Image (cartoon, rainbow, N blue to C red):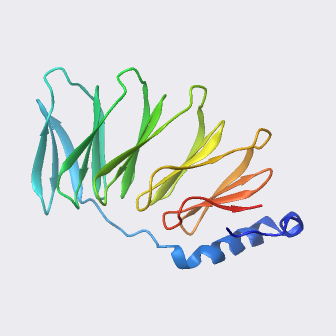
Amino acid sequence: MPTLDRDSVTFLPFQLLLATVVWLFWPGITQANDYGIEVTVRIEPGRAVATSVVSGRREVLLDPQETVASSGASGINAIVVTSRRLLGFSSRTFIWTEAERDLNEKLLDRLVLPTFSVVRTDKHLYGFRGANGIWLDESLGTRETIKTTRSTDYGVVFVTNERLVGFTSLLGDFSSKTLGIHEHVTRLDIEQGLILVTTNRRILVFGSRLSGWEEFE
């Protein structure tokens, strides 16, 4: 894990430190591609329909008592949130995939970006990867609440009252970093596709090509 001398961090101007961090990880950074609109989604009676130039029209049937809460599409993926499940369509796999929802959870919001989507409830974070059509989920603690969110075309970071939770369109599962008892986030920055989280103790870096979080103390 990369480390920086604490005294150096103290006296190094923040912008210079930021440039140093970006330079260290530059070989692993990939600029976002312009995917355009590869897939669209619409709701018809009894079904959700995704349409792409390559796959054409692809349907998924809804149950008689199943209601649609929201839907959206961007880039290579589309999602539909219903009363009992999450549906995701990938323009790369040409199929619908689903994830069961906790029936007692409250839907809070969703984020649909060109390469992935995230659905947030009061109990879970659900992530959908457009590249392979896979759903992943991360449980939230009983007293855990999300304070703010920062995203790029390839990744997103949720700042909660207990930890940092990251999700990317390319690698691994949700990745989290616990915050110390007296540690708090002072700023969030995005540089060259990396999300940098600065706390009163350290700098943490998250990006689509990194294997989890990298930390500078």
Q: Quadrant of residue 61?
A: top left
Q: Nearer the viewer, residue 3 or 14?
A: 3
Q: Nearer the viewer, residue 175 or 145?
A: 175
- Residue occupying the point 48% across, 49% down: 174
- Residue occupying the point 57% across, 26% down: 142
Q: Quadrant of residue 81?
A: top left
Quarter of the C terminus within the rendering: bottom right
Image side of residue 60 versus residue 131, left or right: left
- Most extreme residue toward the front is 1
Whole-percent x and y of residue 189? 64, 58
The number of numbered badges drawn on the structure is 0
Q: Nearer the viewer, residue 74 or 80?
A: 80
Image side of residue 66 versus residue 201, left or right: left
- Residue occupying the point 41% across, 62% down: 170
Q: Residue 143, relative to residue 161: is it above or below?
A: above
Quarter of the N terminus within the rendering: bottom right
Whole-percent x and y of residue 83? 29, 25
Q: Quadrant of residue 68?
A: top left
Image side of residue 153 versus residue 149, left or right: left
Q: Residue 84, relative to residue 54: is it above or below?
A: above
Q: Residue 175, relative to residue 209: is it above or below?
A: above
- Residue occupying the point 85% across, 64% down: 6
Whole-percent x and y of residue 176? 57, 48
Image side of residue 42 versus residue 133, left or right: left
